[in-house]
């Protein structure tokens, strides 16, 4: 081999390496993504890592992974990170704010953007990645719930690939017919079964729900996740958000989606075809499987997930969800059927209520009350463009916030 041959073969190799940005690298999905990527350093190069305020965690990741760029949303945290990186003699650029997130979502060396920020905060950088025509791995479900219409349309316009990482949606994607594209209904699909573990309070007596603590709500039986999604899993709002997510991703109506409680979390979801065939995707409950699938699709790569032992699983149980004791799911069905800005209002009120519960300002059973109040007092619009969505997101946050404030006991109240 001549030097030129060697160089061009090295260039070819460089060319085949896929650049990756992880939006939200310090979170649960971010850390699982890093674990999968570490197994495939010849295939993927981590160009950028981002976080909100966790300086020490992001610095530790920077030292270990040496990305080209690190972004912190918070400018003060970014300044601290910059100091640490300089002191350690590392060659990593530090950016801050939404502009910084947008820069790494569109960077020319980046092919894959992993959307792993929690909540509506991920909307703009994820949409920016879509508009830059990237492969976008969607873990962050809230932006799709708020503005699925915009995401699907923009992905088609800019040639972006939207690949679901949420385990149920990744399972459904794996069971869809060949050639399927996000948002385009498949005529041969009759129904989708969305499986749900039932969360930590599946068997809790309903009268005990009012006094459960954030710690109990965050102790999920099958998955270790961030605190917001853990509370959503406990109220079943997570399944409600996933219902809306499924409608957008798979071009189905809410009535084509059946939610089934499946406590083992082994079947991650199922697709029923018009001929009566039902396809399912199974595996151990470990987010590295959907992450690896979406990173490499249509190829398959090792994820580090252990093999499923069906004999140990032994039983696969199914039951209907209890909409009376878990009203968040009913509210989500209403928002999904209502359409327009209703899902954005639902999502915003839920984010505010969950944070108030985590801050011990309201009880667990107050969460659906805050959402129901906001949904019934803020008139939704049929418009689905981004301005309408963002304006209703803001109004819903204000309304939910005032409702919580009005219900809180005043300091000194009742004290003589
Ligand atoms: P997490 O709380 O563990 O991590 C969130 C990440 O986002 C962190 O890196 C944090 O620094 C960053 N972040 C938080 N607020 C931010 C802001 N305002 N701006 C910029 N960055 C911000 O959350 P998670 O459990 O990893 O979940 C991430 C998303 O993936 C959520 O939307 C969740 O619903 C979805 N998801 C998670 C799981 C799971 O197993 N954890 C499964 C399916 C879907
Ligand atoms: Mg899920």
Image (cartoon, helix red, strand yellow):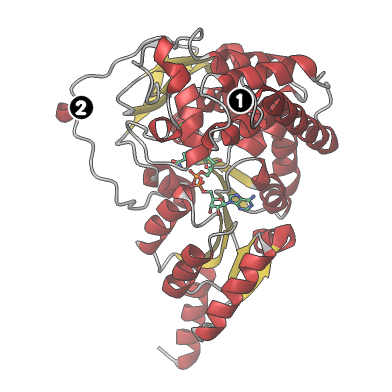
* Depicted 56 relative to depicted 278: above or below: below
Q: Residue furthest left?
A: 311
Q: Position of residue 226 (x, y in %)?
A: 47, 43
Instruction: Quarter of the image for the N terminus: give it.
Output: bottom left
Which residue was labeled with disc 2?
313
Marks 2 and 1 in Cβ contact (< 8 Å)? no
Q: Residue furthest bottom?
A: 3
Which residue appears at 64% of the width and 73% of the height?
79
Q: Earlier in the sequence, mark 2 or mark 1?
A: 2
Instruction: Quarter of the image for the C terminus: give it.
Output: top right
Q: Position of residue 390 (x, y in %)?
A: 79, 37
Which residue appears at 35% of the width and 20% of the height?
262
Q: Is mark 1 within 8 Å of ligand 1?
A: no
Left/right placement of residue 327 relative to residue 33 reads right
Which residue was labeled with disc 1?
415
Q: Position of residue 391 (x, y in %)?
A: 83, 35
Is residue 187 visible in the rendered structure shown here? no
Instruction: Give the camera-side residue of 190 and 82.
Output: 82
* Image quadrant assignment for residue 309: top left
From the image, state whether disc 2 or disc 1 is nearer to you. Answer: 1
Which residue appears at 66% of the width and 61% of the height?
74
């Amino acid at each position: 081999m001549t030097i030129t041959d060697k160089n061009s073969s090295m260039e070819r190799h460089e060319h085949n390496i896929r650049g990756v940005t992880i939006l939200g690298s310090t979170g649960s999905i971010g850390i699982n993504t890093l674990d999968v990527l570490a197994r495939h350093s010849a295939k993927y190069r981590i160009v950028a890592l981002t976080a909100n305020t966790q300086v020490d965690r992001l610095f530790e990741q920077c030292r270990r992974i040496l990305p080209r760029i690190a972004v912190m949303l918070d400018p003060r945290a970014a300044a601290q990170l910059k100091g640490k990186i300089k002191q350690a003699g590392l060659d990593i650029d530090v950016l801050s704010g939404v502009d910084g997130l947008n820069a790494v979502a569109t960077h020319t060396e980046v092919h894959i953007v992993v959307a792993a920020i929690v909540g509506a905060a991920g909307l703009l950088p994820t949409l920016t990645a879509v508009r830059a025509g990237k492969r976008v791995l969607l873990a962050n479900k809230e932006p799709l719930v708020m503005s699925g219409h915009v995401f699907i349309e923009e992905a088609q316009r800019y040639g972006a690939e939207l690949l679901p990482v949420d385990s149920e949606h990744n399972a459904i994607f794996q069971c869809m017919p060949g050639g399927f594209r996000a948002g385009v209904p498949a005529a041969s699909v009759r129904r989708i079964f969305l499986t749900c573990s039932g969360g930590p309070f599946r068997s809790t007596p309903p009268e005990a729900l009012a006094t459960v603590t954030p710690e109990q709500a965050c102790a999920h039986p099958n998955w270790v996740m961030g605190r917001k999604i853990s509370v959503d899993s406990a109220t079943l709002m997570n399944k409600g958000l996933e219902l809306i997510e499924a409608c957008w991703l798979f071009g189905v109506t809410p009535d084509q989606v059946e939610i089934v409680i499946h406590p083992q979390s082994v079947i991650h979801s199922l697709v029923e075809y018009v001929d009566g065939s039902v396809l399912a995707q199974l595996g151990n409950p470990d987010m590295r499987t959907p992450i690896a699938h979406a990173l490499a699709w249509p190829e398959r790569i090792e994820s580090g997930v252990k093999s499923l032992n069906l004999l140990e699983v032994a039983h696969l149980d199914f039951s209907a969800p209890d909409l009376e004791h878990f009203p968040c799911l009913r509210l989500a069905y209403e928002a999904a059927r209502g359409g327009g800005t209703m899902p954005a209002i639902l999502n915003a009120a839920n984010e505010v209520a969950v944070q108030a519960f985590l801050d011990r300002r309201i009880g667990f059973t107050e969460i659906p009350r805050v959402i129901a109040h906001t949904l019934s007092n803020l008139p939704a619009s049929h418009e689905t463009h981004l301005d309408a969505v963002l304006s209703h997101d803001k109004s819903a946050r204000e309304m939910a916030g005032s409702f919580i404030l009005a219900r809180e006991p005043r300091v000194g109240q009742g004290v003589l």
